Each structure stands twice: as C-alpha cells, then as structure tokens.
Image (tube, helix red, strand yellow):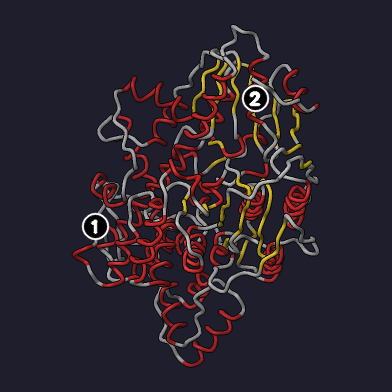
C-alpha cells in the first residue's frame, strides 16, 4: 500500500529503542506512526496495542491487518480484562450497571426522616465503586471519596453518611467478587489490575494515555515488556470519570509529534492561543503545533457542544430554522435522552405533569415534584439528571414533539454520510474529524476564566480548582481541533484580538443558547473546614441509613429584605448552589422564588 513520507519526528519514534513516551498533538498521525513503529520491530516480536475504545479498536485492527502485522494484538483495557477475568471466574456481567433502586434492594438500604436519603446514599455508593475500580488503590479505605465531590450540598450529605457509603461500597464489591450478583465493567477491570497479570508480550503500545484509568496504568507500568505510551496532555477530558494523565506519570524518554495533518496553520494558531489560557492557572510551557492540513472540502459538517443541554438546544434551533432531511447524533440520539442508569427524559416529563402512573423509573417515581428531584440532584451531583430537568423546565410538554422531530430526521449509522449536520458533545467527538465545525457557546471563555479567578481572590469561601479549569480549556481545544477546514466559533470564545478569517468565522451567540454559567459550579469548589466524621455504626446491618449527625437546614421565610438580598446575589453572578447555601434552602427553592419575583433568566 502507498505510504506518505514520514516527518523527522515520526522517524525518530520509529527508530527509538527502550521505553518511550510520545506527546502527539491533535491530527498528528499517531496511529500511522504507531503502526510504522510496530512494523519496524522484529517479525517474531509479540506486540499488544491498547486502544481507547471499541470503535478505535476496530479501526486499528483493520489498519494493522492492512499492514500484514499478524504479530500485533489489538485490545481495549476492558476487552483485555474481560478475557482474563470473566471467563476464569464464570462471572455474569451487568451491561448497564446498577440503578440506585437496585442498589437499595441489594444492600437493604432503608430510609430515614430525610427525603430519599436511601437513594442518595445508593447513588454515592455507585460512584464510590466506580472511583475505587478506576483507581490504582488496593483497598476502598485507601481513598477519600470526598475528594471527588464539588457541590456544597452533596459534600455536606456525604460527610454525614460517609461510614454508610464506604461500608455499602465494600459490601457491593464483595457481592460481585463472590459472584452473588452480576459484575460491572469497572469491577472486572479492577479485579484484573489486582490480579497483577504478567502479559505475554515483548512490546505494549498504550494509546490515548492521557485519559487512562489509574487501574490500567498500574497494569501497564508493571509489565516487563518494552512500553510505549502515547497521547496528548491537552486532550485530557475524562477527569470526571477518574481518568489520570498517564503521560505525566510515565518517566520515559520523551518524543514529540507536533505536526498536524488535519488542519491548517490558522486553526493551529487558534489552538495554541486557547491552550495559552492555562497561564491564568499556572505558568505553562508554550505549545508548538504546525498545521499542515489542506482543508479543501466543506462536505461533512458538525455542531459540537460542551453539554448535552447546549447541544439539544442548538439542534432544535437548527431544524426549526432550516429545511433539513437528515441529521445525525454521534453516539445515537437515544444516548442524549437516557441517563447511564436508564433514567428517561420522559420519566422526568411525567413527573413534571404529575402523571405518576406513567413513570417507569423507581427513583423518579418516588419524588413529589421537580423541586424535590432537584434536591436529590444537589446531593448527588447527578449531572445527567440535572440536564433532563433543565430540558423539561425549558420546553415542558413540547419535549415529546421536539424529540419526535429530531428522531424522524435522525439517520442511522449506515447513512451517517447523508446527514446535513452531525451533532455531538465534545466527549463523543473525541477522535473524530469533520470538514466544517460549528461550536456552541457553552464552553469556557477566557473572559469567564478571568472572572472566576477574580471571584476566587475576593471570595474566601471558594477554592480555585485548577485541574477542572485546565480540563475545561482542554475541552475547547479538542472541539477546535476536530475541523479539517472551517470553524464557526462564537465571538465570546475567540481569544482577544485573534483575527477572524475565511477559515475561522466569528459568529454572534444565539439568544437561545446557554452559556458557561450552566456548568460554572463544577469548577468553583466551596472550601469547608475539615472535621472529624462522627457516625454510629449499626450493630446488625451496616447499610441502613441512620439519622444524620448534623441538623437539617431550616428554610427561611421570604421577606422583602431577603428578596432584595436574593436579587443582589443573583445579579452579581453568584451560583445558584452558593445562594441556596447562603439562605439555608435548596437550589429549587431559589429558582422558584426568583421566578415568583420575575427575576430568573432561563438562558442562564
């Protein structure tokens, strides 16, 4: 097969010996480089290539086969772990994971006087299990689950119930380990790590390492094979899934792939400018990206958003404003209307309408109304459920017609090339590329980043989470670098004085779009004084929810003076979560009060 001429950087990778770390910018041809590296190894060498996900695995398998590299085995971390663990122990795998109601039943978690405490505890047990399974730690007790919680209300709840959450986590893992219940995908990966496998390969090539789990990195680093770790530090966008930037943890000889064959130098310059925003967080080294793409076609068009809500709002506007025959959602449109645990947007809508007999999800069905569901969200940081609530509040009973219209226009995978517009969140677009990219205005801007920094200086109750903010910058970088040719970008997201051009088209944000305020509270962490957890462990069942050891916040009675104070906080941009904590009430109550005062702006 014909091969393009390799760059000096690619040649250096191929000629290297020993353990190697490769930092590769977006579109730098790293897969081609890895294949050439494998082809230059001895013919009898046993090589393992670890792909990021199933779709990448299938594509990599095809390309390795085209090169005739029958000595290379392609796996994902989970497919490798599955073969070593599930068959050996005769486990049964629960494909979608456990719902909160199922965890309550399995662990016999019972409620108390606090609304839905059993479901909130179950939610945190589920997340603690995921946190542990993706970590490199050997014991649950080696982790502090509070380190993963941002929202003040959620953190207060977890502190109060920490012992029960930790004990429930250990019991659920024990039940899976014994085979008493079906195991999750996270569980068999963890069991694989803890089995200390000795993999029968001479070379292991670990791709997209910036978003690897700590568990898989631990397996990789313990192998005696020659190890090659590949990724882009600035494409780390899965910290919320407990991914770690493995590139920073592998102290190997380092080589760069800084030439992108995807886009032109104009796009490269924009990407460099955006990454320079990280200097607002800490001093960083400048990034070198050479754009060598040709960018001639306008065929494949995509709209990319930071959030599911931002994407759906934009898709609704698009089909309303344009005569469209076909659209396509990366990951299938159903993935945008159902949560990972199976909770449906339609269940939330039925709760909104009071149609309890039509609610299928036990958790949603147990709620009195949307305000009560929002209280649950505040204590669990369930962002998927929060998005569904926002959609229902925004569109009410129009949701049915909107989703119906989107589904009627949505084409299947086999006809994806017929879509006039492809819609995707930035997470689902990772690894993809398009001729033309339109960005939704729900990413972090430099102006907003500066505002957050100033808030941190003046607000002593808030901590500046640089890791999360750095990942927010990465999200915009990843979105920008999906284009092969043109980029339509909201003017608020362009770096100051960055020139628009024929390839970089500046657009005014639509009034119906949400902005970054929708996700602000996930990057401003409230600081709370550390205190010793006080719990009383039950004698028989460690998983019944006991009475909280802290008193429940008492809701204030609204007065004209408090209404005035509320408006001032809201107009000054204080997050709804922090306003709720200040007034001793819930976020839902704050929204309801602002609506009653005709002072709540829906696009925020």
Secondary element at tag 2 = helix
User: Quarter of the image holding residue 46?
Assistant: top right
| Residue 320 vs residue 189, the one in the foreground | 320
Secondary element at tag 1 = loop
Q: Residue 363, image x and y in percent?
A: 28, 58
Q: Earlier in the sequence, mark 1 or mark 2?
A: 2
Residue at 34%, 42% (x, y): give it: 96
Image quadrant holding the N terminus, namely top right
Residue most extreme to the top? 44
User: Quarter of the image holding residue 405?
Assistant: bottom left
* Alpha carbon distance from label 1 to label 2: 48 Å
User: Quarter of the image holding residue 18?
Assistant: top right
Q: Is residue 421 left or right of residue 377?
A: right
Q: Is residue 543 left or right of residue 27?
A: left
Disc number at residue 34?
2
Image quadrant holding the C terminus, namely bottom right
Residue at 26%, 45% (x, y): give it: 107
Q: Residues within 10 Å of mark 2 (few under 14, many from 20)?
A: many
Q: Residue 552, image x and y in percent?
A: 38, 70
User: Of the residues tagged 1 and 2, which is closer to the observer?
Assistant: 2
Q: Which residue is mark 1?
A: 360
Q: Residues within 10 Å of mark 1 (few under 14, many from 20)?
A: some
């Amino acid at each position: 097969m014909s091969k393009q001429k390799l760059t000096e950087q690619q040649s250096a990778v191929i000629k290297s010996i020993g353990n190697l770390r490769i930092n590769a910018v977006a579109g730098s041809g790293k897969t081609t480089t890895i294949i050439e590296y494998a082809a230059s190894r001895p013919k009898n060498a046993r090589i393992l290539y670890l792909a990021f996900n199933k779709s990448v695995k299938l594509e990599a398998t095809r390309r390795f086969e085209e090169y005739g590299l029958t000595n290379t085995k392609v796996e994902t971390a989970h497919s490798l772990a599955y073969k070593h663990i599930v068959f050996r122990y005769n486990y049964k795998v629960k494909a979608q994971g456990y719902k909160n109601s199922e965890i309550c039943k399995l662990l016999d978690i019972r409620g108390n006087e606090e609304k839905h405490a059993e479901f909130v505890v179950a939610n945190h047990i589920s997340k603690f299990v995921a946190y542990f399974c993706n970590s490199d730690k050997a014991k649950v007790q080696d982790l502090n689950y509070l380190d993963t919680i941002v929202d003040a209300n959620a953190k207060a709840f977890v502190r109060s119930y920490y012992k029960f959450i930790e004990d429930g986590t250990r019991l659920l893992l024990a039940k899976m380990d014994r085979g008493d219940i079906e195991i999750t995908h996270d569980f068999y990966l963890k069991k694989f790590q803890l089995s200390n496998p000795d993999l029968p390969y001479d070379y292991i090539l670990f791709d997209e390492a910036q978003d690897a789990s700590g568990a898989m990195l631990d397996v990789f680093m313990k192998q005696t094979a020659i190890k090659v770790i590949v990724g882009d530090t600035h494409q780390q966008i899965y910290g919320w899934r407990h991914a770690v930037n493995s590139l920073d943890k592998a102290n190997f000889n380092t080589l760069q792939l800084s030439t992108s064959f995807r886009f032109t130098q104009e796009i490269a310059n924009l990407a460099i400018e955006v990454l320079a925003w990280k200097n607002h967080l800490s001093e960083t080294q400048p990034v070198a990206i050479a754009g060598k793409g040709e960018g001639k076609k306008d065929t494949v068009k995509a709209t990319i958003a930071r959030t599911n809500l931002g994407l759906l709002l934009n898709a609704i506007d698009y089909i309303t404003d344009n005569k469209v025959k076909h659209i396509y959602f990366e990951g299938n449109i159903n993935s945008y209307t159902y949560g990972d645990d199976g909770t449906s947007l339609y269940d939330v809508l039925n709760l909104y309408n009071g149609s309890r007999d039509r609610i299928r999800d036990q958790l949603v069905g147990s709620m009195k109304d949307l305000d009560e569901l929002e209280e649950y969200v505040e204590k669990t940081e369930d962002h998927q459920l929060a998005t569904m609530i926002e959609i229902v509040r925004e569109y009410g009973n129009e949701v049915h017609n909107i989703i119906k219209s989107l589904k009627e226009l949505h084409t299947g995978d086999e006809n994806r090339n017929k879509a006039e517009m492809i819609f995707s969140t930035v997470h689902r677009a990772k690894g993809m590329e398009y001729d033309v990219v339109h960005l939704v205005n729900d990413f972090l801007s430099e102006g907003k980043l500066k505002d957050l920094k100033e808030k941190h200086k003046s607000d002593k109750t808030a901590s500046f989470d640089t890791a999360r903010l750095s990942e927010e910058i990465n999200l915009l970088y990843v979105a920008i670098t999906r284009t092969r040719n043109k980029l339509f970008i909201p003017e608020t997201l362009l770096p100051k004085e960055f020139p628009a051009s024929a390839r970089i088209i500046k657009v005014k944000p639509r009034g119906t779009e949400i902005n970054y305020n929708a996700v602000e509270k996930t990057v401003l962490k409230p600081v709370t004084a550390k205190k010793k957890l006080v719990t009383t462990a039950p004698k028989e069942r460690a998983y019944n929810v006991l009475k909280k050891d802290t008193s429940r916040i008492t809701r204030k009675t609204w007065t004209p003076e408090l209404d005035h104070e509320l408006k001032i906080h809201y107009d000054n941009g204080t997050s709804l979560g922090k306003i709720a904590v200040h007034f001793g009430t819930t976020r839902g109550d704050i929204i309801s009060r602002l609506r009653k005062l005709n002072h709540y702006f829906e696009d925020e």
